[in-house]
Structure formats: C-alpha cells, structure tokens
Image (cartoon, rainbow, N blue to C red):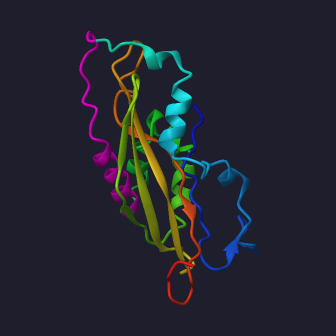
C-alpha cells in the first residue's frame, strides 16, 4: 500500500517561501511534499482499493491470537493533535505506525519539521470508519492552523487516516493497534491582514 507521510507545509502565508527561506510562487511545492495524496478520492477509499489486492485481506480472523488493546482511533487522533499543540514531538510521532517511521521522518526530522510552527491549533471534522475483512480504517478531516516562527499565519486542511489490522494470521501486535497510517494536509492561502482563508 502506498503511504503518504505527514510532511508539513511550512509556508502558508500570502507569499510562499522556499526551503532556503527565499520567496517562491504560491504554486511551488517542494518535491517531497508533492508525493502526498491525491484529491481524486479519500484516503480510506484508496486504502481499501489497495487492500483488495492483498491476500491477507481475505484471511479469517485467528481467534487463538492473544488479545490486544487496540485503543480507539478518535483517541489516537486526539493524542496526536494534543501532542503537536503541546510541542511534544515524540508523542506525536509515536502516534504513527511502525513506531513513528510511517510518518516518513525520524525523530530529529520530525522535530525540525514541526518546530517551524510557533503555534499549532488542530480541529477535527466528522469522521468516517470503514471495515474490510482484514483492516479497519478511520478517516477524519483535519484543520491545522496557527502562526509560523516568522509570525505569518498558516492553515492546512486535509484528511488523516488511521488503521488497524484485524486478528489475522501474521499480524503483529503493533499492526493490531490503531495508529496513523497517512495524511494529506494541504495548505490554504491565508490573508496576511485579516487571517482569513483566500
């Protein structure tokens, strides 16, 4: 399955800025950020479509597997958001699968990426949950807004996808717990004077 890591957009003000801090056009998007999801359909729809090709999807639940506290996807999403707002980068990163590696960033890279935000405020929209034979998905719209270190306002919107594997043969303990699998937060233009979206 293709995974889209949360590679945060750093320049959300009326005038964009490049990785070197120089001004660029608003359409310029760093190559690493361009690999995130498509607007064509939701992340959960894409994930389910990818899963349909995986053999494990059709395997029966293994009742002999030791029980695991899978947690609640809404709680995991809120833990991620609260950790980012509190600048607790380690907790935020560990909300992602593969012990944080599914974020696409190691611990130091994650901190560097998010420390560019002076303030982070995250809100959620109405979530959607889908179950397949092998995997459960939880997709929730996210709005992330605040101020960059340079004082400019930013705003990003897009889906956050969490998943967990059912108790199927070969599933690891970590896979059977809810975790963030991918996100597709994209920048919205913010009016520098009013702070409103343009």
Badge count: 0
- Could you tell me residue 73's position as x and y percent? 32, 43
For the N terminus, the quadrant is: top right
User: In the rendered structure, which segment of residues is drawn in magenta?
Assistant: 63-85
In this picture, residue 120 sits left or right of residue 67? right
Residue at the limit of the structure toward the top, as seen here = 64
Where is residue 167 shown, x and y percent of the image?
33, 19
Q: Quadrant of the C terminus?
A: bottom right
Whether residue 76 appears in magenta in the rendering, the answer is yes
* Residue shown at 56% from the left, 83% from the top: 191
Residue in front for this viewpoint, 166 or 132: 132
**Residue closer to the observer: 169 or 148:** 169
Q: Where does the image place residue 24, in percent across and percent down from the top left?
A: 75, 72
Indicate yes or no whether the magenta region holds residue 8.
no
Instruction: Name the residue at 46% across, 20% down.
Output: 57
> Picture quarter containing residue 112?
bottom right
Indicate the quadrant where residue 84 lies: bottom left
> Going 58% across and 44% down the picture, which residue do you hit?
4
Residue 151 to residue 41: above or below? below
Tell which of 38 and 75 is nearer to you: 38
Work out whether residue 56 or residue 120 is closer to the camera in this orientation and state it: 56
In the shown orientation, is residue 75 left or right of residue 151? left
């Amino acid at each position: 399955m293709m995974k889209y890591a949360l590679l945060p957009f750093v320049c959300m003000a009326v005038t964009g800025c490049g990785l070197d801090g120089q001004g660029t056009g608003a359409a310029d998007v760093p190559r690493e950020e361009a690999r995130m999801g498509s607007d064509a359909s939701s992340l959960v729809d894409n994930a389910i479509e990818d899963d349909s090709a995986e053999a494990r999807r059709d395997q029966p639940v293994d009742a002999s597997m030791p029980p695991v506290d899978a947690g609640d996807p809404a709680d995991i999403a809120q833990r991620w958001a609260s950790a980012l707002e509190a600048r607790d980068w380690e907790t935020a990163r560990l909300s992602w699968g593969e012990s944080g590696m599914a974020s696409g960033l190691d611990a130091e890279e994650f901190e560097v990426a998010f420390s560019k935000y002076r303030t982070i405020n995250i809100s959620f929209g109405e979530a959607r949950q889908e179950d397949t034979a092998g995997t459960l998905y939880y997709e929730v719209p996210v709005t992330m807004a605040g101020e960059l270190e340079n004082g400019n306002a930013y705003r990003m919107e897009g889906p956050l996808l969490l998943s967990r594997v059912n108790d199927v043969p070969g599933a690891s303990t970590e896979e059977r717990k809810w975790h963030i699998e991918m996100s597709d937060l994209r920048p919205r233009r913010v009016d520098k004077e009013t702070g409103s979206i343009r």
